[in-house]
Image (tube, helix red, strand yellow):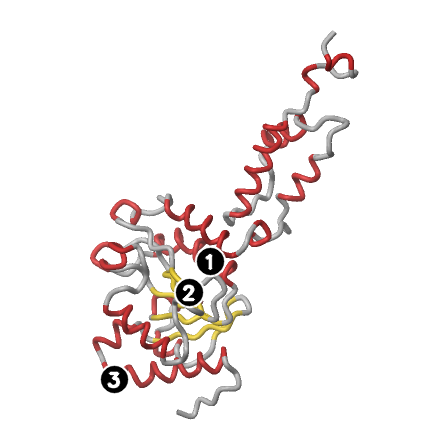
């Protein structure tokens, strides 16, 4: 008689803890990367059931269902925001959901701090961004940094910068609707993880995509918007300011409104 049988257990009743941990890890990894499971795959439930012995710590099927429910804790509950961003970035790094993945050199996920005052959203990577894998690093990026600095913001201290699409559209064309749709879940998850105090949309494409509107930038920039409880300001893209210096004055007005949002006690009479 084996030791299992002497304890009143047959060999096939022994808990397979390796399977148990692998199943739980699969569920946890999915949740931490932003995937919302509405139903745990039956195969995982079977492995959880078979790996749970009568005298082992209880891991009932209901517990797995709770992990996968629509009210599951956000990814941040499974790690800090920086870790959640890293997991999401790894997922974006292998994305092939649209044709932009074929021609890209880099997936330009984003750059900045994990608990920003302001999330800046642009249209998409250009040639220099594609080469370096970082957002807004060319001439437009230098101007953007100056614009942010003018109201006390910096990508290295209190901002995060991202784009509507993470891969460069060929010839810097505007992202197509299907390309935006394929990439938007990554941006929305970034917003949920980052929880910025405010969002600054740099340019028409970014504002239209996030607000789901067809209004032009001249109208969008004249009012404050709301995105899931987060105030949103739209302004001209830095590249537009480089082409037309007459836009710098209205852009400065937009930046002052943003400054007043994140620093309510600051006077905007400048």
Residue located 28% across and 64% down the image? 137
- Mark nearest the camera among 1 and 2 is 2
Classify mark 2: helix, strand or loop.
Answer: strand
Q: Is residue 224 left or right of residue 27?
A: left
Distance from the alpha carbon under mark 3 to that under mark 1: 33 Å
Identify residue for label 1: 190
Numbered mark located on residue 269 in the image: none
- Check contact, mark 3 vs mark 2: CB within 8 A: no
The vertical placement of 95 against 170, above or below, is: above
Identify residue for label 3: 246
- Mark nearest the camera among 3 and 1 is 1
* Residue placed most toward the observer, 42 or 112: 112
* Residue placed most toward the observer, 31 or 25: 25
The quadrant of the image that shows the N terminus is top right
Q: Earlier in the sequence, mark 3 or mark 2?
A: 2
Q: Earlier in the sequence, mark 1 or mark 2?
A: 2
Marker count (numbered): 3
- Check contact, mark 1 vs mark 2: CB within 8 A: yes
């Amino acid at each position: 008689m084996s030791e299992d049988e002497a304890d009143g257990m047959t060999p096939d009743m022994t808990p397979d803890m390796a399977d148990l941990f692998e199943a739980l890890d699969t569920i946890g990894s999915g949740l931490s990367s932003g995937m919302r499971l509405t139903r745990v795959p039956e195969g995982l439930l079977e492995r959880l059931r078979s790996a749970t012995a009568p005298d082992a710590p209880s891991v009932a099927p209901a517990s797995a269902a709770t992990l996968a429910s629509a009210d599951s804790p956000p990814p941040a509950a499974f790690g800090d925001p920086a870790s959640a961003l890293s997991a999401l970035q790894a997922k974006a790094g292998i994305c092939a959901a649209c044709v932009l993945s074929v021609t890209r050199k880099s997936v330009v996920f984003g750059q900045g701090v994990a608990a920003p005052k302001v999330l800046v959203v642009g249209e998409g990577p250009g040639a220099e961004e594609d080469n370096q894998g970082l957002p807004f690093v060319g001439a437009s990026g230098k101007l953007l940094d100056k614009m942010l600095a003018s109201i006390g913001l910096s990508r290295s201290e209190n901002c995060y910068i991202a784009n509507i699409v993470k891969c460069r559209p060929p010839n810097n064309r505007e992202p197509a609707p299907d390309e935006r749709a394929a990439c938007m879940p990554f941006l929305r998850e970034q917003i949920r993880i980052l929880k910025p105090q405010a969002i600054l949309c740099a340019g028409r494409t970014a504002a239209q995509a996030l607000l789901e509107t067809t209004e032009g930038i001249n109208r969008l920039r004249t009012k404050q918007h709301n995105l899931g409880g987060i105030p949103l300001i739209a302004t001209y893209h830095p590249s537009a300011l480089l082409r037309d210096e007459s836009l710098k004055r209205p852009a400065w007005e937009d930046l002052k409104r943003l400054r007043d949002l994140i620093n309510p006690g600051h006077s905007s009479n400048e």
